[in-house]
Structure formats: C-alpha cells, structure tokens
Amino acid sequence: MGGDWESWSALLGTAAPSPRFFPYFTTADAVRATAGACRRLPMLAAEHRIVTVARGKHVVVPRGAGARWLPDPVEAAWLIAAARFAPHRPHISGLSAAALHGAAARPHDEVHVTVPFQARALELPALAMTVRFHQRDPEEVAKLQRERFGLTGGEQIAVTQMRGEICMPLVTTPAQTVLDLLHSPTRAGDRYDALDAADRLVRRVPLRELDRLAAGQRRLDASDRILGKRWPRRRP
C-alpha cells in the first residue's frame, strides 16, 4: 500500500519489510522488526510522526500533515479490521457505509465494520470513536443458502473500494447498504437514522439490482420494504 508517508525503515531504522496494512501497524509489528521499538514508539508519537489511535495500534502521519492531524476514523477502523482478520475481507457497513455514500452524516462516535468472526467493540480514544464489529462471514452465508434453502451460487455480499487519505477501504455498495439497513435497522445504530439513510440511498439504486441481491441473499423482507409492502414505521 503506497502513500506519502515515512517508510517503515525510516521510522524504525530497520530493513525489515513493512506490515501488510502499513501505514497502520501494531506495537507487536514494531517489536518484531526491531529490538528498540518500545523506546522508539513514544518518541515517534511525541514528534507527531505516528498517532496512537488505541493501545498498541498506530497510524503513520502523512508528510506535510498539520500538528493536529488525525486519521479518518472510518479508514482507521477498516485498517485495524483488515489487519486483524486478514486474509478475510472486512468491510464498512450500515450507517457508516451510508455516510461514505453521502446518504447519512459522517460518524461522530461509532464506526460499523462487518467481519467474519465475532469480536468485541474496540475503543479508539485518540479519535473519540468506538468501532462496532458485526459478524457476517460470506462463506457461512453461502453455506446457509445451500443447506437451508438448497441454493447454489447465491449472491455474495456486494462491496466496493473507496479511495481515502491513507487507504482504500472496502465498503458495501449502495444497493447492499440499502438491504442491510432495511433488514436490520437497529444493527447499525439508531433505527430511524438507518431508515432515513436507506430512503435517501434507495433512490439512486436500480430496483433490479436490489431485487437480485435480496433474492440471492435471502433478504426478501428487505426487498418487500423497498417495494413498499412492509415499510417499517417512520419517526413521527
């Protein structure tokens, strides 16, 4: 992952290869690279060459960034999840995805990330943000389709990459985001915010695409709501 920030070797004075999701790295990554990491990391943080977003989790500050620069919370959350769950493909979901698609306010206290295994929420004190992990394994989805419904070749979770400042996070597509918000409005945070975001986003998505995804993922309840058959009650 290239970018305009100091190299791993320049930061730590080591010839060891950089971590896979650099400019994000953990204290454990640094310790494996050099014996003096535990002394060097606090110095790098004090010089604002890295930001420690949570205990043991760091992001390199881009060259030319101001003294108050902080990583985007959504990008930081995705990098943490991607490094933790690799080679699986975590993705930004729910209201956080809706925000990236311009259908909801930017996250102010929570970021929602879908991951293949159950995981506790993670606090990012430096960003005043909590990362909420939601379990949904695409392989398990496909297995459920085969065993319970006798389906093969069902639709996978639809994701896309979006360009950010320090990474290109995977994000549910607009159509997938609509389905997720309508299928489980409370899972992404506030129910009414989820429905409002789905209402704004659904206008940009072809109904045929929504119908195909809903059928393939057995989310026909969400499809019904899109068609106005069982739209949940809105906030007065």
Image (cartoon, grey):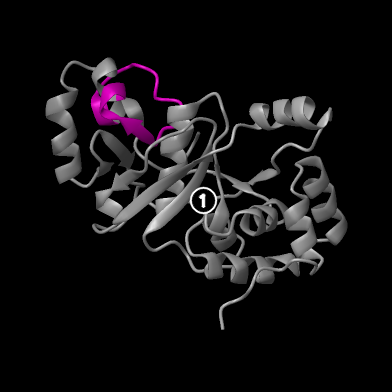
Residue occupying image coordinates x 76% and y 25%: 147
First to last magenta residue range: 11-29
Residue occupying image coordinates x 87% and y 56%: 208
Residue occupying image coordinates x 34% and y 16%: 16
Task: Compare residues 229 and 208 and report the one nearer the observer.
Answer: 229
In percent of width and height, residue 197 lies at 61, 68
Question: Could you tell me the amino acid type at mark 1?
Answer: Gly
Q: Which residue is mark 1?
A: 164
Residue 135 in the image: above or below residue 103: above
In percent of width and height, residue 73 lies at 40, 52
Dividing the picture into quadrants, the one containing residue 207 is bottom right
Quadrant that contains the C terminus: bottom right
In percent of width and height, residue 94 lies at 56, 54
In percent of width and height, residue 80 lies at 41, 37
Dividing the picture into quadrants, the one containing residue 201 is bottom right
Label 1 residue SS: loop
Q: Is residue 178 left or right of residue 39?
A: right
Q: Would you say residue 153 is visible in this rendering?
A: no
Residue 169 in the image: above or below residue 202: above
Q: Residues within 10 Å of mark 1 (few under 14, many from 20)?
A: few
Q: Is residue 200 left or right of residue 24?
A: right
- Looking at the image, how many numbered discs can be counted on the residues? 1
Query: Is residue 155 magenta-colored?
Result: no
Dividing the picture into quadrants, the one containing residue 110 is bottom left
